[in-house]
Protein backbone atom coordinates (compact mmCIF):
# COMPACT_ATOMS: atom_id res chain seq x y z
CA UNK A 1 0.00 0.00 0.00
CA UNK A 2 2.83 2.45 0.65
CA UNK A 3 6.54 2.91 0.59
CA UNK A 4 8.76 4.81 2.99
CA UNK A 5 12.27 6.17 2.51
CA UNK A 6 14.60 8.69 4.10
CA UNK A 7 15.69 12.07 2.75
CA UNK A 8 18.99 13.87 3.19
CA UNK A 9 18.31 14.97 6.78
CA UNK A 10 17.41 11.38 7.81
CA UNK A 11 13.76 12.31 8.32
CA UNK A 12 11.54 9.44 7.14
CA UNK A 13 9.43 10.26 4.10
CA UNK A 14 6.42 8.56 2.59
CA UNK A 15 4.92 8.21 -0.85
CA UNK A 16 1.62 6.38 -1.34
CA UNK A 17 1.45 3.48 -3.74
CA UNK A 18 -0.10 4.10 -7.18
CA UNK A 19 -3.46 2.55 -6.27
CA UNK A 20 -3.78 4.80 -3.22
CA UNK A 21 -2.86 7.88 -5.25
CA UNK A 22 -5.38 6.92 -7.93
CA UNK A 23 -8.13 6.46 -5.35
CA UNK A 24 -7.27 9.79 -3.73
CA UNK A 25 -7.35 11.52 -7.13
CA UNK A 26 -10.79 10.09 -7.89
CA UNK A 27 -12.17 11.19 -4.53
CA UNK A 28 -10.74 14.68 -5.00
CA UNK A 29 -12.25 15.01 -8.47
CA UNK A 30 -15.68 13.99 -7.16
CA UNK A 31 -15.31 16.39 -4.21
CA UNK A 32 -14.40 19.26 -6.53
CA UNK A 33 -17.44 18.40 -8.67
CA UNK A 34 -19.76 18.47 -5.65
CA UNK A 35 -18.28 21.78 -4.50
CA UNK A 36 -18.63 23.25 -7.99
CA UNK A 37 -22.34 22.35 -8.07
CA UNK A 38 -22.75 23.90 -4.59
CA UNK A 39 -21.21 27.18 -5.79
CA UNK A 40 -23.36 27.17 -8.95
CA UNK A 41 -26.51 26.68 -6.86
CA UNK A 42 -25.41 29.53 -4.61
CA UNK A 43 -25.08 31.80 -7.65
CA UNK A 44 -28.48 30.70 -8.95
CA UNK A 45 -30.02 31.50 -5.57
CA UNK A 46 -28.37 34.94 -5.44
CA UNK A 47 -28.96 36.05 -9.03
CA UNK A 48 -32.32 34.38 -9.70
CA UNK A 49 -34.25 33.23 -6.62
CA UNK A 50 -33.59 36.39 -4.62
CA UNK A 51 -34.45 38.70 -7.56
CA UNK A 52 -38.07 38.15 -8.57
CA UNK A 53 -39.34 40.47 -11.32
CA UNK A 54 -41.57 43.41 -10.35
CA UNK A 55 -44.73 41.86 -11.85
CA UNK A 56 -44.24 38.71 -9.77
CA UNK A 57 -43.79 40.76 -6.61
CA UNK A 58 -47.00 42.67 -7.29
CA UNK A 59 -48.98 39.52 -8.03
CA UNK A 60 -47.69 37.73 -4.92
CA UNK A 61 -48.03 40.87 -2.77
CA UNK A 62 -44.47 40.43 -1.55
CA UNK A 63 -41.71 37.88 -1.94
CA UNK A 64 -43.29 34.82 -3.61
CA UNK A 65 -43.68 31.84 -1.30
CA UNK A 66 -42.53 29.36 -3.93
CA UNK A 67 -39.24 31.23 -4.27
CA UNK A 68 -38.82 31.29 -0.50
CA UNK A 69 -39.42 27.53 -0.13
CA UNK A 70 -37.09 26.89 -3.07
CA UNK A 71 -34.45 29.04 -1.37
CA UNK A 72 -34.70 26.90 1.78
CA UNK A 73 -34.31 23.82 -0.39
CA UNK A 74 -31.23 25.31 -2.06
CA UNK A 75 -29.68 25.98 1.36
CA UNK A 76 -30.14 22.34 2.36
CA UNK A 77 -28.84 20.96 -0.93
CA UNK A 78 -25.81 23.30 -0.92
CA UNK A 79 -25.04 22.10 2.60
CA UNK A 80 -25.28 18.44 1.61
CA UNK A 81 -23.00 19.01 -1.38
CA UNK A 82 -20.45 20.94 0.69
CA UNK A 83 -20.40 18.29 3.43
CA UNK A 84 -20.23 15.41 0.95
CA UNK A 85 -17.31 17.05 -0.82
CA UNK A 86 -15.50 17.66 2.46
CA UNK A 87 -15.86 14.04 3.58
CA UNK A 88 -14.47 12.77 0.27
CA UNK A 89 -11.65 15.33 0.39
CA UNK A 90 -10.69 14.19 3.89
CA UNK A 91 -10.66 10.56 2.77
CA UNK A 92 -8.38 11.51 -0.12
CA UNK A 93 -6.03 13.30 2.28
CA UNK A 94 -5.75 10.13 4.37
CA UNK A 95 -4.73 8.15 1.28
CA UNK A 96 -2.38 10.78 -0.14
CA UNK A 97 -1.43 13.22 2.64
CA UNK A 98 0.48 16.45 2.32
CA UNK A 99 3.87 17.12 3.92
CA UNK A 100 4.36 19.34 6.97
CA UNK A 101 7.55 20.54 5.27
CA UNK A 102 5.27 22.62 3.03
CA UNK A 103 3.18 24.36 5.70
CA UNK A 104 1.08 26.53 3.37
CA UNK A 105 0.13 23.61 1.12
CA UNK A 106 -0.39 21.39 4.17
CA UNK A 107 -2.81 23.89 5.73
CA UNK A 108 -4.76 24.65 2.55
CA UNK A 109 -5.04 21.01 1.48
CA UNK A 110 -6.33 19.89 4.86
CA UNK A 111 -8.70 22.79 5.53
CA UNK A 112 -9.99 23.37 2.00
CA UNK A 113 -13.40 21.94 2.88
CA UNK A 114 -13.96 24.63 5.50
CA UNK A 115 -12.99 27.38 3.05
CA UNK A 116 -15.36 26.01 0.41
CA UNK A 117 -18.21 25.86 2.93
CA UNK A 118 -17.67 29.52 3.82
CA UNK A 119 -17.48 30.46 0.14
CA UNK A 120 -20.70 28.58 -0.56
CA UNK A 121 -22.65 30.29 2.22
CA UNK A 122 -21.30 33.68 3.32
CA UNK A 123 -22.30 35.59 0.13
CA UNK A 124 -25.71 33.87 0.15
CA UNK A 125 -26.32 34.69 3.81
CA UNK A 126 -25.37 38.31 3.20
CA UNK A 127 -27.71 38.60 0.22
CA UNK A 128 -30.59 37.04 2.16
CA UNK A 129 -30.37 39.62 4.93
CA UNK A 130 -29.83 42.45 2.44
CA UNK A 131 -32.82 41.44 0.33
CA UNK A 132 -35.45 44.18 0.26
CA UNK A 133 -38.31 42.05 -1.03
CA UNK A 134 -38.59 39.46 1.77
CA UNK A 135 -40.30 40.37 5.01
CA UNK A 136 -38.54 40.09 8.35
CA UNK A 137 -39.92 36.61 9.11
CA UNK A 138 -38.82 35.22 5.74
CA UNK A 139 -35.35 36.74 6.15
CA UNK A 140 -34.89 35.45 9.68
CA UNK A 141 -35.95 31.89 8.86
CA UNK A 142 -34.02 31.61 5.60
CA UNK A 143 -30.98 33.42 6.98
CA UNK A 144 -31.02 31.45 10.22
CA UNK A 145 -31.26 28.16 8.34
CA UNK A 146 -28.36 29.18 6.11
CA UNK A 147 -26.23 30.13 9.11
CA UNK A 148 -26.89 26.82 10.88
CA UNK A 149 -26.13 24.75 7.77
CA UNK A 150 -23.04 26.87 7.06
CA UNK A 151 -21.69 26.27 10.57
CA UNK A 152 -22.25 22.51 10.26
CA UNK A 153 -20.63 22.38 6.82
CA UNK A 154 -17.66 24.45 7.98
CA UNK A 155 -17.04 22.32 11.08
CA UNK A 156 -17.24 19.14 9.00
CA UNK A 157 -14.78 20.69 6.54
CA UNK A 158 -12.17 21.31 9.25
CA UNK A 159 -9.59 18.56 9.73
CA UNK A 160 -8.70 18.81 13.41
CA UNK A 161 -6.03 16.07 13.21
CA UNK A 162 -4.66 16.16 9.66
CA UNK A 163 -2.46 13.29 8.55
CA UNK A 164 0.98 14.11 7.17
CA UNK A 165 3.47 12.18 5.07
CA UNK A 166 5.88 12.43 7.99
CA UNK A 167 3.46 10.75 10.39
CA UNK A 168 2.87 7.82 8.05
CA UNK A 169 6.62 7.38 7.50
CA UNK A 170 7.48 7.58 11.19
CA UNK A 171 4.78 5.16 12.30
CA UNK A 172 5.72 2.73 9.54
CA UNK A 173 9.36 2.87 10.60
CA UNK A 174 8.45 2.41 14.26
CA UNK A 175 6.34 -0.67 13.51
CA UNK A 176 9.15 -2.19 11.44
CA UNK A 177 11.64 -1.45 14.19
CA UNK A 178 9.49 -2.99 16.92
CA UNK A 179 8.05 -6.08 15.22
CA UNK A 180 10.22 -6.57 12.14
CA UNK A 181 7.58 -5.83 9.49
CA UNK A 182 5.05 -3.17 8.58
CA UNK A 183 2.01 -5.09 9.82
CA UNK A 184 -0.56 -3.88 12.35
CA UNK A 185 -3.98 -4.97 13.57
CA UNK A 186 -7.14 -2.98 14.23
CA UNK A 187 -10.87 -3.32 14.83
CA UNK A 188 -13.54 -1.52 12.83
CA UNK A 189 -14.65 0.46 15.86
CA UNK A 190 -11.22 1.17 17.36
CA UNK A 191 -9.35 4.43 17.05
CA UNK A 192 -5.79 3.06 17.18
CA UNK A 193 -3.94 0.08 15.74
CA UNK A 194 -1.99 -2.64 17.51
CA UNK A 195 1.24 -4.58 17.08
CA UNK A 196 -0.36 -8.05 17.09
CA UNK A 197 -3.75 -9.71 17.04
CA UNK A 198 -3.50 -11.07 20.56
CA UNK A 199 -3.55 -7.83 22.55
CA UNK A 200 -6.20 -7.36 25.22
CA UNK A 201 -7.79 -4.42 23.40
CA UNK A 202 -8.76 -6.75 20.54
CA UNK A 203 -9.70 -9.74 22.65
CA UNK A 204 -13.32 -8.79 23.31
CA UNK A 205 -14.22 -6.65 20.31
CA UNK A 206 -17.45 -7.56 18.56
CA UNK A 207 -16.50 -6.00 15.22
CA UNK A 208 -14.20 -7.47 12.60
CA UNK A 209 -10.43 -7.37 13.19
CA UNK A 210 -8.30 -6.45 10.19
CA UNK A 211 -4.59 -6.37 9.50
CA UNK A 212 -2.30 -4.65 7.03
CA UNK A 213 0.39 -1.99 6.73
CA UNK A 214 0.11 1.10 8.90
CA UNK A 215 -0.63 3.27 5.84
CA UNK A 216 -3.78 1.24 5.16
CA UNK A 217 -5.01 1.75 8.72
CA UNK A 218 -4.26 5.47 8.60
CA UNK A 219 -6.03 5.67 5.25
CA UNK A 220 -9.14 4.27 6.94
CA UNK A 221 -9.06 7.06 9.52
CA UNK A 222 -7.21 5.41 12.41
CA UNK A 223 -5.10 7.73 14.58
CA UNK A 224 -2.07 5.45 14.38
CA UNK A 225 -0.36 2.92 16.59
CA UNK A 226 -1.26 2.78 20.26
CA UNK A 227 0.99 4.87 22.48
CA UNK A 228 0.92 2.11 25.13
CA UNK A 229 3.80 0.51 23.28
CA UNK A 230 5.73 -0.92 26.22
CA UNK A 231 2.69 -2.77 27.58
CA UNK A 232 1.68 -3.93 24.12
CA UNK A 233 5.15 -5.23 23.33
CA UNK A 234 4.89 -7.51 26.36
CA UNK A 235 1.44 -8.76 25.35
CA UNK A 236 2.74 -9.56 21.87
CA UNK A 237 5.76 -11.46 23.20
CA UNK A 238 8.35 -8.88 22.13
CA UNK A 239 11.05 -7.27 24.24
CA UNK A 240 10.61 -3.51 24.43
CA UNK A 241 13.80 -1.58 23.58
CA UNK A 242 15.36 0.57 26.27
CA UNK A 243 14.46 3.76 24.38
CA UNK A 244 10.74 2.94 24.14
CA UNK A 245 9.82 6.24 25.82
CA UNK A 246 11.76 8.14 23.15
CA UNK A 247 9.99 6.15 20.43
CA UNK A 248 6.60 7.08 21.88
CA UNK A 249 7.61 10.73 21.95
CA UNK A 250 8.81 10.47 18.34
CA UNK A 251 5.38 9.22 17.33
CA UNK A 252 3.69 12.03 19.27
CA UNK A 253 5.87 14.61 17.54
CA UNK A 254 5.10 13.14 14.13
CA UNK A 255 1.38 13.46 14.89
CA UNK A 256 1.83 17.09 15.87
CA UNK A 257 0.51 16.54 19.39
Image (cartoon, helix red, strand yellow):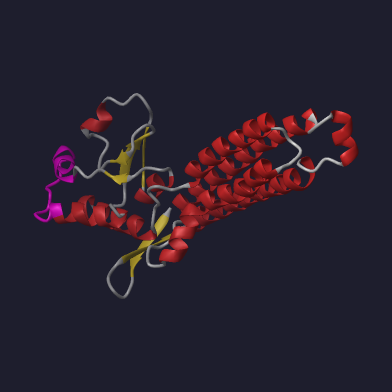
Q: Give how far across and how far down residue 139 sits, in percent.
A: 66, 35
Asked if 14 appears above or below 128 in the picture, the reply is: below
Range covered by the magenta-colored residues: 229-245
In the rendered view, tell whether residue 49 sits above or below residue 202.
below
Residue drawn at point x = 12 percent, y = 49 percent: 240
Position of residue 235 measured from the top left corner of the image (x, y, whole percent): 16, 37
Q: In which quarter of the image is residue 194?
A: top left
What residue appears at the point 34 percent right and 24 percent down from the top-left corner?
206
Q: Camera-side residue: 69 or 22?
A: 69
**Residue furthest toward the left?**
242
Which residue lies most toward the bottom here?
A: 8
Give residue 159's position: percent from left, percent from top: 43, 48
Left or right, 15 with respect to 171, comes to right
Residue 55 sits inside the magenta stretch: no
Left or right: 83 in relation to 43: left
Tell me where residue 81 sits by quadrant: top right
Task: Give the image location of residue 171, x and y in percent.
Answer: 29, 53
The answer to whether residue 28 of the structure is visible from this angle is: yes
Residue in view at x 63 percent, y 33 percent? 140
**Residue nearer the viewer, 42 or 230:** 42
Residue shown at the point (41%, 43%) measured from the top left:
221
Q: In this view, does 179 lie above or below 231?
A: below
Q: Taking the image as drawn, is residue 34 in sight?
A: no
Amino acid sequence: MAKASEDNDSTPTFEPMPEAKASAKTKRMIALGLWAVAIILELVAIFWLLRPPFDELVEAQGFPQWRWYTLIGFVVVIGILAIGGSLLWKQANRLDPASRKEPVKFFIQNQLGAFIALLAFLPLIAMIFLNKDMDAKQKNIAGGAAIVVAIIATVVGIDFQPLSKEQVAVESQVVRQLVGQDLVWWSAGGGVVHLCEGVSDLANVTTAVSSGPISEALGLGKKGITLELEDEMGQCGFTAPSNIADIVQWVRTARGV
